[in-house]
């Protein structure tokens, strides 16, 4: 019992360790500072027994991102020893975002990842480019605010 308690005490902080891509900096030549862009934030909770399939599908989607018309930037982050992941994408407009959601790669990835998903939170915001979050702490604060957040399965 003591060994289990010590192991839990040692590994619990590791659940908070995360690794991710830097938050995208949208270049000034892409859109003016006051131009409104579409910011999409997600948080997922993944069944650890099915994490490998989720990671495989996430990699497919990430590999397709550079080819998406209207995409201004994207990033992903995941817990190293936990079961959460986050994404952020910035779009010129909602039509570009919607086209990505309807893309074959995205639709297939969602269908194949569904069994691994325990919870999904999604937030779509329209913000001036100059007000985009500067780092993951700012992204997580935006996601923590329940206003405009949609939650599934949790």
Image (cartoon, helix red, strand yellow):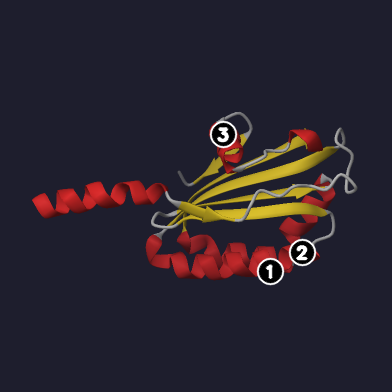
Depicted 78 relative to depicted 35: above or below: below
- Judging by the rendered image, the residue that carries numbered circle 2 is 66
| Residue 14 in sight here | yes
Q: Residue furthest left?
A: 1
Q: Are marks 2 and 1 in contact (CB under 8 Å)?
A: yes
Badge 3 is on which residue?
A: 141
Q: Position of residue 3 (x, y in %)?
A: 12, 54
Q: Is residue 75 above or below residue 134?
A: below
Identify the mark nearer the N-term, 3 or 1.
1
Q: In the drawing, does residue 129 fall left or right of residue 63?
A: right
Q: Is residue 11 left or right of residue 124?
A: left
Residue 1 visible in the displayed image: no
Percent across and percent down for residue 105 are: 69, 68
Asked if the residue at tag 3 contacts the one at tag 2, i.e. Cβ–Cβ closer than 8 Å, the answer is no
**Residue labelled with disc 1:** 63
Gap between marks 2 and 3 measured at Cα:
26 Å
The residue carrying pointer 1 sits among few (fewer than 14), some (14 to 19) or many (20 or more) residues within 10 Å by Cα, namely few
- Residue at 38% over, 65% down: 49
Q: Position of residue 33 (x, y in %)?
A: 85, 36
Dot 2 lies on which element? helix
| Label 3 environment density (alpha carbons within 10 Å; few <14, some 14–19, many ≥20) | few
**Is 7 or 83 nearer to us in this picture?**
7
> How many C-alpha atoms fall within 10 Å of the one at disc 2: few (<14), some, or many (≥20)?
few
Mark-to-mark CA distance, 3 and 1:
27 Å
Comes first in the chain, label 2 or label 3: 2
Q: Nearer the viewer, residue 5 or 52?
A: 5
Image quarter of residue 58:
bottom right
């Amino acid at each position: 019992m003591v060994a289990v308690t010590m192991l839990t005490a040692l590994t619990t902080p590791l659940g908070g360790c995360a690794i991710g891509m830097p938050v995208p900096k949208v270049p000034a030549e892409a859109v003016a500072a006051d131009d409104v862009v579409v910011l999409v934030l997600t948080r997922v909770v993944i069944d650890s027994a099915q994490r490998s399939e989720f990671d495989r599908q996430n990699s497919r989607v990430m590999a397709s991102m550079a080819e998406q018309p209207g995409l201004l930037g994207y990033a992903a982050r995941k817990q190293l020893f936990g079961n959460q992941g986050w994404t952020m994408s910035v779009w010129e407009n909602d039509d570009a975002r919607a086209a990505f959601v309807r893309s074959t790669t995205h639709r297939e990835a969602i269908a194949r990842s569904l069994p691994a998903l325990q919870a999904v939170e999604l937030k779509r915001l329209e913000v001036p480019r100059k007000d985009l979050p500067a780092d993951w702490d700012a992204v997580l604060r935006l996601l923590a605010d329940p206003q405009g957040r949609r939650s599934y399965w949790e």
